[in-house]
Amino acid sequence: MNAVRPAEADQGAEFARAAVWLLRMQAVCAVLAAVAAGLLFDARFALAVLGGAGIGLLLTAVSALRAAVAGASPQARLSAFYRGMALKLAIAAVVFVMVVAWFPAWFVPVLVGFVVTLPAYWIALLRLGVDAPGVGSQTKQG
């Protein structure tokens, strides 16, 4: 029987909190972009933007779930991360080809919706950098 050590459980819980926070931030970006698109253009444009943002959310969830099932070793985690990113890219390619093939007139707003979810990654990195112990504190070696 595989027992989960407390440190591993804490890391898994922290990863889950970070992933959920990222998905929430992307959802906020999606709603703000859809509202702006609705005000500037029309409801159909706003829905296309929301659809593109949904693609971004889906891709983040897929890669996070893939990474979440990794083993405890650093090699297993890195391997799961790369497999998750490869899966994310493959799904993105398929979905965007489908959009171009089936909804060519709506490709730009769908792409805009996807792109507005990307700054959430930068915001998450800034947030994690602020929360990380030792980050931002400069010590002199001497």
Image (cartoon, helix red, strand yellow):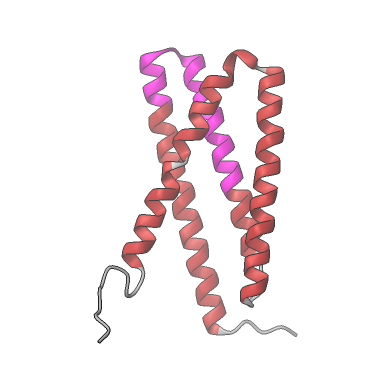
Give the residue at x 54% y 27%: 111
Where is residue 69? Give x, y as percent: 66, 65
Whether 37 is drawn above or below 63: the answer is above
Where is residue 31? Give x, y as percent: 42, 32
Q: Quadrant of residue 76?
A: bottom right
On the rendered image, what quadrant is the N terminus found in? bottom right
Is residue 106 inside the magenta stretch? no
Q: Quadrant of residue 26?
A: top left
Q: How would you classify the magenta stretch by its main secondary structure?
A: helix
Residue 35 lies left or right of residue 107; in this view the side is left
On the rendered image, what quadrant is the C terminus found in? bottom left
Q: Quadrant of residue 65?
A: bottom right
Residue 116 lies left or right of residue 136; in this view the side is right
Give the residue at x 60% y 13%: 105
**Residue furthest right in the image:** 1
Q: Which residues are magenta?
A: 34-60
Residue 131 lies left or right of residue 95; in this view the side is left
Where is residue 91? Give x, y as percent: 69, 40
Residue 47 lies left or right of residue 39; in this view the side is right
Number of labels in the image equals 0
Give the residue at x 57% y 48%: 60
Give the residue at x 63% y 60%: 81
Where is residue 78? Give x, y as percent: 63, 66
